[in-house]
Image: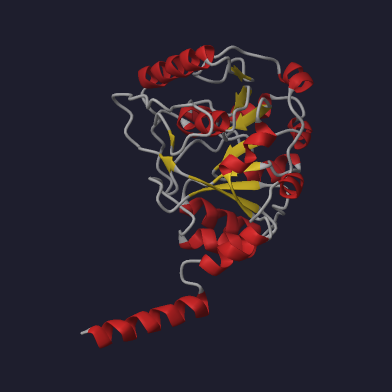
Amino acid sequence: MQIRKKIRNRIFNWLDNKIDLFGNNLFKKMREEGHLIYLSELIPFFKGSKIYTFGTGGSIANLNDVSRLQNYNLMMTTTGPYYCYLKYGFVPNLWILTYAPIIEKIFENEKTKPFDLSNTFILVPTNDSESKINIQTPVVKELMLKHPEATYVLYRCILHTRYWPIKVPATYLRKDIEPIHGLSSNILDHLFFPVSFFLDVSTVYFSGVDLIPTTGHFWDRNFHYQTMDGKPLNFPDEEIMHQAAEIVQKICNERNKQIYRLEKNETLLKSYPHIDFNISLNDASPKITPSYARQKIEIF
């Protein structure tokens, strides 16, 4: 029995070294080259900054000259970064991975027009996170091999999918405390706000989180929200969304953090104060690039 076990272990180790089953050799190489870092290592760069967080809702199309955001910090998720590149000519510097089929969709799109991710931090949950995707998800390794120019950022998270009743973790929206929790209401309070305030930003501007099925997407207003298999997407109950927004704003007021919506009409989240896009640009923080952070972060 022990002999068989030793033989199995040897075969497994040989395979692992040969084809890097779990990506350990790849991760080590990327870490040494500064292309694999931890979210906490970005705090000194984003502390006190004012950043943008965009969903994929059609209301983004209402903003004047979105391409100006290429010089500012913009966080997006799902296929947003790719369509931002197609429509506005730049890739956001912060991309949060949430779902494996999204990456596969990106690969499919890149067959027609590839894009460069050298100026992008790609946020990926650790393998001990409670999420639909993590650093050892096979398609993530495929993304790393296809886009080694990107900088991948690891963070621990607990992202439940239950909406009701809302339970607020004691560490919610606090800086530099992992695992990062979501409230499971919408992409803002579930992901964008927790990640942003973990980085200790001072202000978040958001757009494209309409939560209205008929607003479509910013690259196609007629393409209504749906699941990956083409079924209509059900948004969280309005009461839950408004309660979560109230919780978020109460916490932010206590901690001197600011949140503004850029869309005046096409969003259900009107309890957040509105600010004109042009005015926000006058006060927003300059873009943090991976190359700049790589020069400053000490990799041991």
Image-quadrant location for residue 179: top left
Image-quadrant location for residue 257: top right
Residue farthest toward the left in the current orientation of the protein: 1
User: In this image, 154 relative to 114: left or right?
Assistant: left
Question: Which of 237/286 is in front?
Answer: 286
Q: Is residue 261 visible?
A: yes
> Residue 176, percent across and down?
53, 34
Look at the picture and state if 38 lies above or below 268. Answer: below
User: In this image, 251 relative to 28: left or right?
Assistant: left
> Residue 241, percent across and down?
41, 21
- The residue lying at 44 percent from left, 51 percent from top is 133
- The residue lying at 75 percent from left, 35 percent from top is 287
> Residue 206, percent across and down?
60, 25
Residue farthest toward the front in the current orientation of the protein: 300
User: In this image, 12 relative to 28: left or right?
Assistant: left
Look at the picture and state if 37 lies above or below 65. Answer: below
